[in-house]
Amino acid sequence: MNRYEEAKAMYAKIGVDTDAAINKLKSIPLSLHCWQGDDVKGFDTEGPLTGGIQTTGNYIGAARTPEELMADIDKVISLCPGKLKLNLHACYAIFEDGEFADRDKLEPKHFKRWVDFAKEREMGIDFNPTFFSHPKVKYGLTLSSPDEETRKFWIEHGKACIRISQYFAEETGVPCVMNIWTGDGFKDIPADRMAPRMRYKESIEAILSEPFDRNKVKPCVESKVFGIGVESYTTGSAEFGLTFAATHEGCLPLMDNGHYHPTELVSDKIPALLCFYPEIALHITRGVRWDSDHAVLFDDETKEMAKEIVRCDAIDRVYMALDFFDASINRISAWTVGVRSWQKAMLSALCTPNEELKKLQDENRLTELMVRQEAMKTMPFGDIWNEYCKQCGVTDDNAWFDDVMKYEDEVLSKRV
C-alpha cells in the first residue's frame, strides 16, 4: 500500500472520501491575475503606478511585453494543478500596428489576443476596469469626482469594460466576473463624506445601465478600508459596497481579504453574505497589517476562507480569484505559491468531515468538536495533496522550484 492509499484509509475512517475530494477540486475554477507578472504596469501607459496602489521591490524579470507576460503565465500554468481562469485589467489591452485607444474607447478587438490565448488553454476570462495610473485620475478621484468631465470619462470606461466582458463570455463560453474598484478617497479628514459617495453610486449605476446578459457578465463592487494617499476616507467603503450590491439586481459584492481592518476576518463574512446574496466574489490575498497584497500562503485565514465556502455548500456561488503583486521575489514563484496554497486550502476543506462537525455543534457537544477539529490538524493531508498534484500532472512542493530557477536563469535574467 502506498502513502496515498494509507492516507485515504485514514480519512475514510472519519467519513471522508479523498478520491471524491480530489475529483471535485479538479472542477473548481480559480482566477489567475495577470498583474503579478509585471507589477501592475499594463501596456497602455508608460507612467508610474498611481491611484492608491503600489508595488514594492525590484526583483529581476518583470514582463515587459504581452509575449513575455503570456510566456510567464504559461510557466505558472505548467506548475499548478487544477482549473484556472485568466483575470485581466483593462490596462492590459494589446494595440496592434501603432493603434491606441484611451480607456473610454477600448473595444473587444483590443483583447483579441488574450481571448485567443485563453481559448487555446480552455480558460475563461475575468475582467477589471482600471481606475488608476492614468492622467484623468483627477486629484485622486475618478467615479466620485466633482468634475463632471472626469466622471464621464470613467463612466464610459466602465461601459466599455461591460461590452468587453460580454465579449469574453461569448468567446470562451464561461461567465465573466467584472469587478469595479477605485482608489477614490482623501488623505485627510474630508468636509463632505456623503456627496462623493452619491456621485460614486450614480456613476456605477450609469456603468451598469450598459446592456449586458446577466448570465454572462457578473458585475461586482469591491470595497476597501483605505489606501495609499487616501488614509482618512475611502469612497467605496465596505458599507457602501455591500449596500450597493444588495440594492442593485445582478450586482455582486466582492470581498478582498486585505481590504479590512486586521482584526476583521473575511472567513466570518463569507457565511454572513451567503445568507442574503445568491452569489459573491472574492479576491484572495494576504494582507500583512493592512492591504499589502503579499503572496497567498497556506495559513490559517486562507484555510478558514476555503472551509466556509465548502461547508456552506457554496462552491457554485462563490467566484474565487487571486489578487496580489510582489516585486521583491521571483514573480513566477509568487504566483505558483499563491495558486497552490489556495488549492491546498480548498482540498483541505473538501477533506474535512463537515457534516459530522456541524452535528456536534448542533448537539452542543462542543468539547468533542474541539477534540475532532484538533485531530484533523495532524491528518496526513500532505499525501492527499501530493496525489492531487500527481493526477494533475504537476510536480510536488519539493520539486517545482528548481524549474522556476531554471526559467529565471534562461529567461527572466535576460530581461534587462
Image (cartoon, rainbow, N blue to C red):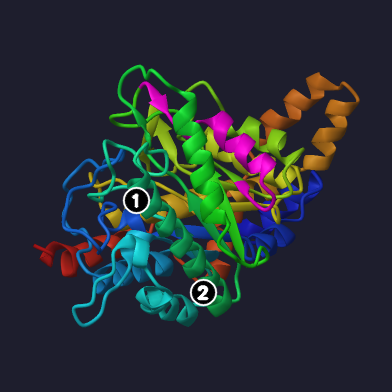
Label 1 and label 2: CA atoms lie apart by 30 Å
Amino acid identity at mark 1: Ala
The residue closer to the viewer here, 378 or 180, is 180
- Return the residue found at the far right: 363
The residue at the point 54 percent across, 31 percent down is: 238
Position of 233 relative to 394 (above/below) = above
Determine whether, in the image, residue 99 is placed left or right of residue 360.
left
Quarter of the figure that contains the C terminus: bottom left
* One can see residue 123 in this view: no
Q: Quadrant of residue 404?
A: bottom left
Residue 206 magenta-highlighted: no
* Of 92 and 265, the residue lying toward us: 92
Q: Which residues are magenta?
A: 232-252
> Tag 2's secondary structure?
helix
* Residue 51 appears left or right of 340: left
Tally the marks.
2
Q: Is residue 86 above or below residue 303?
A: below
- Three-letter residue code for mark 2: Tyr
- Using a 10 Å C-alpha cutoff, classify the residue at mark 1 as few (fewer than 14 neighbours), some (14 to 19) or many (20 or more): many
- The residue identified by callout 1 is 334
- Camera-side mark, 1 or 2: 2
Tag shown at residue 167: 2
Circle 1 — which element? helix
Of 13 and 15, nearer the camera is 15
**Disc on res. 229:** none
Q: Position of residue 301 (x, y in %)?
A: 54, 34
Residue 206 in the image: x percent, y percent? 53, 52
Q: Is residue 22 visible?
A: yes
